[in-house]
């Protein structure tokens, strides 16, 4: 058995030279090393495919024809790049030359097919490329005389692997050689061994960056990890030459996949900041190539009307996958050579995708207007016009459809492909319903309903035109295909877009899992360095009153008091900033950044002030913070806005739009409240400090902000004050590999939900009929219609208000539940239940009019005090993920009965909370704060006078420190002489400066507040 490396080389060549491979054997003698081209093949191709252009060129040049032709093509490549020249050709004094011909979309022009077949692809082994040495590349593939693919082949049986391929490209291949210059000759470099493939599109010495090009351990598009599966019919890596480099495949990739990405980046040169263009040649990763081709093949085979769920991990390149899919679908033809889709509509909220989509597609075609983006500067009417005009690719937001859904032209015979970026629960709501209403061809549904009723279609519409028009938009439609991309599919997403298996479960059409992305190094494992803290505290009453209050509301109020207490924020601020300075600051070459995730907008504002105070007190100059929240936050009498709080280092205001860029360039910590927890792509983000409860998808999306890779970024760090390791593990595991749904929803349970509403006897069938008679009446709305409808609902609202507190709560929950599930159900199935639809129409208006349940508010601020407090580390290490074995399940119609709110004495409630959060507090910890506070409060009247005649800042920073220092020192000496247990705690007070300052400040504020309010 011949097992040498040359055998692998020979076996690859054998396939490529076969009929299936489509290549011809190349000849090194034809290759001009100085020009890095096979000019003989190059000219022969032009003579064969463009004889008139060549004749004109020869007449125009007269002498040195080959030299001038080389100059023409080489100048074009130097100016525009090889990928541009291959796609669009080049010009010489008005003569248009093609460098290659690509497969036509239809069979209407057979001449184009003949030209396509005349492309010449050569395979050359041991390709000696250099003018200065005798080095060779194991294998080079060329297109019409131009080298486009290089392969370095290795064999574990002879002691080498793809690691040797990498080293060869990095250290033995000079990037300055013409053949290796970026986007001038070879477009992609593969390293191949018996089990794995890597690739790069740019040789850059030791900085060359390689990407895995494997299928996945169980094959492409299915659940698994890194690597390739066993191939019973040959090499584990044979997919590379059989499926990727095969003639038709490679030409397809050159025409429709390879993309030159141009970004403007800021760089520091000679101490000055400059903006430079960074060019990257994007060659599709294997899972991207696979998903696009499988989607296109399925649509070509089955036509429109199917839904597809693509579960691709963060870091999988979803933006490019969506762009490639959109472009392919927009040009897809059926067997009759007709376009399958009238328009491809990309539904997204990401402006990055808008720009990337246009840039990617414009690199394929020079056709202006191919992509119509309905952005912030355009209206819903622009969306309507784009759809009615049949624009090929439209990028929009979901929220624009409810405005224009009734103004779209008749869709009879028009198919639409809808690509959903980050599919989530909004796809099951009202806006998604209006999207379907706008685009659905309802002729088939109308015929089906007329057949059920035994009537003519015209009769059906004449009777209840508007009502029927709504009914027939329900369910799935043959003219609509949905392509939903997400890393974290929920149950509803799986049933709406997933593929149903024979056992009734639902699965994604294509999977590139979090596990595979982590193992292949496309994203970082954010759970590798995880630290959790537990907050231990004890609350006490600071009032002789002991009011009776609702237990659950009081518990929330007390916990909120603790979480916003200055001592809590000060302690956590110290931990966050010191961890940032010791762990984060010097990562990624000193450019690493951190995010602080807070529980509310008020928490974010107060954290910001604590950070500023701590940084100033510690005189740090290496921590620069920003804060992000929406709207206006009122804290006491002061109102705060994001732009009002954030300032550049020069002092100017930072707008919401500027914040991401300013954070990237000049700041290193960002405090957030419900912002930047999804869709925020900052590769320099290394650490996260979490002070908020996170569950399920929200936990995965939030923590995944850290997973982006960047040169020099080798790890991440998370410090969590609220969630424990088991909770985070439970949140991540369903999305670690493939996410599936156990069974479809039982749609008939919607009737149970309806009956629960009727049990309250607030309305009846007659009320509904009167209402819908106005709502669905023929003709236009008059000036009194809305008034009549709301007047009909008023007695029902009055009867609702007469219910007891628990029944009002239950009815409100049930009506929301019924409306939510009906909206969802009618997107996945067509029920043709007229009475049920009438009930939904009626209740959807009623739900907006019934007043919300009034919640009792408690003001306990002056009735509570934080007696003692401690943070203790509870976990540090790697949270290991295991595949979830249980599929997701969802239910419908269930609303938990609200228990009558129990009330208890405030003192008893506080005791219960302290049992949960203060059980590990020692008496010594308590004495530090308690004893010092008590002693200081017993001081002579001078401190009290100072408190009453100075503001808080002067008292805390200038007056109080001397009193605190003297009292603390005396107490420390007393503890030493008594050999008491508190001595260790006092020792820490004087040994830990930040602990001393924090303790002093929190006691100062408490003393100040109480001295000012104490009577003379």
Image (tube, rainbow, N blue to C red):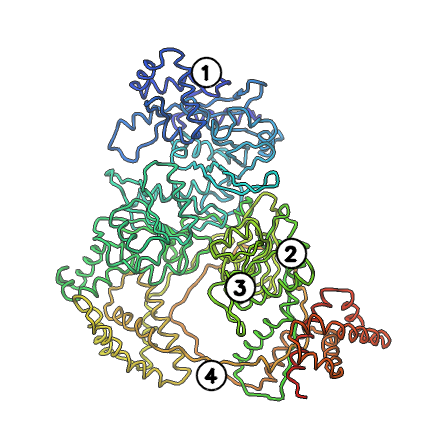
Provide the secondary structure element on which disc 3 rests: loop
Of circles 1 and 2, which is in front? 2
Q: Are marks 2 and 3 in contact (CB under 8 Å)?
A: no
Q: Which residue is situated farthest in the front direction here?
A: 949
Q: Quadrant of the C terminus?
A: bottom right
Q: Where does residue 907 sit, x and y in percent of width and height?
A: 61, 85
Vertical placement of residue 15 versus 965, above or below: above
Of 752 and 666, the residue lying toward us: 666
First in residue order: circle 1 vs circle 3: 1
The answer, for residue 87, to whether it is visible in the render is yes
Provide the secondary structure element on which disc 4 rests: loop
* Mark 3, residue position: 694
Q: Where does residue 190 sit, x and y in percent of width and height?
A: 52, 32
Q: Real-space Cα distance between discs 1 and 2?
A: 61 Å
* Mark 2, residue position: 580
Seen at 53% across and 52% down, the residue is 662
Q: Real-space Cα distance between discs 2 and 3?
A: 22 Å
Q: Quadrant of the N terminus?
A: top right
Of 435 and 600, the residue lying toward us: 600
Q: Which mark is residue 226?
A: none
Q: Which mark is residue 30?
A: 1
Which corner quadrant of the image does residue 398 belong to? Answer: bottom left
């Amino acid at each position: 058995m011949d097992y040498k490396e040359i055998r692998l080389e020979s076996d690859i060549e054998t396939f490529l030279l076969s009929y299936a491979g489509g290549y011809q054997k190349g000849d090194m003698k034809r290759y001009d090393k100085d020009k890095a081209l096979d000019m003989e093949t190059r000219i022969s191709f032009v003579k064969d495919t463009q004889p008139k252009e060549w004749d004109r060129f020869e007449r125009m040049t007269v002498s040195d024809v080959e030299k001038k032709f080389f100059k023409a093509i080489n100048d074009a490549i130097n100016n525009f790049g090889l990928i541009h020249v291959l796609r669009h050709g080049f010009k010489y004094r008005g003569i248009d030359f093609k460098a290659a011909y690509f497969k036509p979309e239809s069979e209407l022009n057979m001449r184009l097919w003949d030209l396509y077949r005349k492309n010449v692809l050569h395979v050359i082994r041991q390709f000696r490329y250099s003018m200065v040495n005798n080095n060779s590349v194991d294998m080079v593939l060329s297109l019409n005389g131009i080298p486009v693919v290089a392969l370095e082949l290795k064999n574990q049986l002879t002691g080498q692997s793809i690691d040797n391929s990498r080293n060869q490209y990095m250290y033995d291949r000079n990037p300055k050689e013409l053949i290796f210059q970026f986007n001038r000759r070879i477009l992609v470099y593969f390293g191949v061994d018996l089990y794995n493939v890597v690739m790069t599109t740019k040789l850059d010495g030791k900085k060359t960056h390689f990407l895995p090009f494997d299928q996945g351990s169980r094959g492409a598009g299915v659940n698994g990890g890194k690597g390739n599966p066993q191939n019973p019919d040959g090499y584990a890596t044979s997919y590379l030459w059989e499926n990727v480099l095969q003639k038709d495949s490679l030409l397809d990739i050159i025409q429709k996949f390879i993309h030159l990405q141009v970004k403007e980046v800021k760089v520091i040169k000679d101490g000055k900041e400059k903006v430079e263009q960074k060019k990257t040649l994007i060659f599709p990763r294997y899972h991207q190539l696979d998903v696009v081709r499988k989607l296109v093949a399925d649509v070509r085979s089955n036509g429109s009307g199917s839904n597809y769920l693509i579960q691709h991990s963060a870091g999988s390149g979803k933006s490019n996958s969506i762009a490639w899919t959109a472009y392919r679908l927009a040009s897809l033809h059926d067997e009759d050579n007709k376009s399958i889709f009238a328009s491809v509509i990309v539904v997204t909220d990401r402006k990055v995708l808008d720009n990337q989509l246009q840039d990617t597609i414009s690199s394929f075609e020079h056709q202006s207007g191919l992509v119509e983006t309905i952005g912030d500067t355009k209206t819903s009417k622009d969306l309507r016009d784009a759809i009615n005009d049949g624009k090929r690719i439209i990028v929009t937001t979901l929220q624009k459809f409810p405005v224009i859904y009734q103004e779209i032209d008749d869709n009879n015979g028009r198919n639409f492909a809808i690509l959903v970026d980050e599919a989530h629960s909004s796809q099951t709501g009202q806006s998604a319903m209006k999207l379907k209403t706008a685009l659905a061809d309802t002729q088939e549904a109308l015929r089906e309903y007329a057949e059920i009723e035994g009537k003519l279609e015209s009769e059906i519409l004449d009777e209840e035109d508007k009502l029927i028009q709504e009914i027939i938009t329900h369910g799935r439609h043959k003219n609509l295909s949905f392509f939903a991309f997400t890393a974290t599919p929920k149950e509803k997403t799986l049933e709406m877009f997933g593929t149903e298996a024979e056992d009734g479960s639902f699965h994604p059409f294509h999977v590139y899992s979090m596990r595979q992305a982590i193992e292949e190094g496309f994203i970082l494992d954010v759970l590798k360095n995880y630290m959790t803290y537990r907050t231990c505290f004890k609350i006490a009453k600071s009032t002789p009153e002991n009011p009776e209050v609702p237990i659950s509301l009081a518990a929330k109020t007390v916990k909120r008091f603790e979480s916003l207490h200055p001592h809590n924020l000060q302690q956590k601020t110290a931990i966050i900033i010191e961890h940032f300075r010791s762990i984060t600051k010097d990562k990624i070459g000193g450019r690493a950044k951190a995010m602080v995730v807070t529980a509310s907008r008020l928490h974010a504002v107060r954290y910001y002030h604590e950070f500023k105070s701590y940084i100033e007190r510690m005189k740090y100059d290496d921590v620069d913070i920003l804060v992000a929240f929406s709207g206006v936050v009122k804290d006491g009498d002061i109102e705060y806005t994001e732009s009002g709080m954030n300032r550049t280092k020069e002092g100017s205001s930072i707008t919401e739009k500027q914040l991401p860029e300013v954070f990237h360039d000049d700041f290193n910590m960002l405090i957030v409240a419900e912002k930047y927890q999804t869709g925020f792509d900052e590769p320099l983000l290394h650490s996260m400090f979490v002070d908020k409860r996170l569950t399920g998808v929200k936990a995965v999306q939030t923590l995944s902000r850290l997973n982006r890779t960047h040169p020099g970024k080798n790890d991440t760090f998370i410090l969590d004050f609220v969630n424990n390791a088991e909770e985070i593990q439970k949140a991540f595991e369903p999305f670690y590999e493939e996410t599936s749904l156990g069974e479809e929803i039982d749609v008939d349970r919607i009737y149970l939900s309806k009956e629960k509403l009727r049990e309250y006897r607030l309305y009846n069938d007659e009320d509904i009929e009167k209402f819908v008679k106005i709502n669905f009446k023929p003709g236009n709305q008059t000036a009194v219609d809305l008034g009549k409808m709301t007047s009909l609902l008023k007695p029902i609202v009055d009867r609702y208000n007469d219910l007891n507190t628990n029944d009002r709560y239950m009815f409100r929950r049930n009506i929301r539940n019924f409306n939510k599930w009906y909206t969802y159900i009618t997107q996945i199935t067509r029920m043709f239940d007229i009475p049920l639809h009438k009930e939904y129409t009626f209740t959807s208006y009623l739900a907006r009019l019934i007043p919300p349940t009034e919640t009792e508010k408690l003001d306990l601020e002056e009735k509570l005090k934080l007696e003692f407090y401690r943070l203790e580390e509870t976990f540090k290490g790697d949270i290991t993920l295991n595949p979830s074995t249980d599929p997701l399940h969802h239910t419908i119609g269930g609303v938990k009965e609200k228990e009558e709110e129990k009330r208890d004495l405030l003192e008893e409630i506080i005791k219960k909370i302290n049992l949960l959060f203060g059980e590990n507090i020692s008496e010594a910890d308590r004495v530090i704060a308690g004893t010092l506070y008590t002693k200081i409060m017993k001081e002579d009247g001078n401190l009290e006078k100072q408190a009453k005649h100075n503001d808080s800042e002067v008292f805390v920073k200038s007056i109080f420190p001397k009193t605190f220092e003297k009292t603390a020192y005396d107490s420390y000496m007393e503890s030493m002489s008594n050999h008491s247990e508190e001595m260790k705690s006092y020792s820490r007070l004087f040994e830990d400066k930040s602990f001393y300052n924090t303790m002093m400040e929190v006691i100062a504020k408490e003393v100040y507040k109480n001295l000012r309010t104490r009577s003379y």
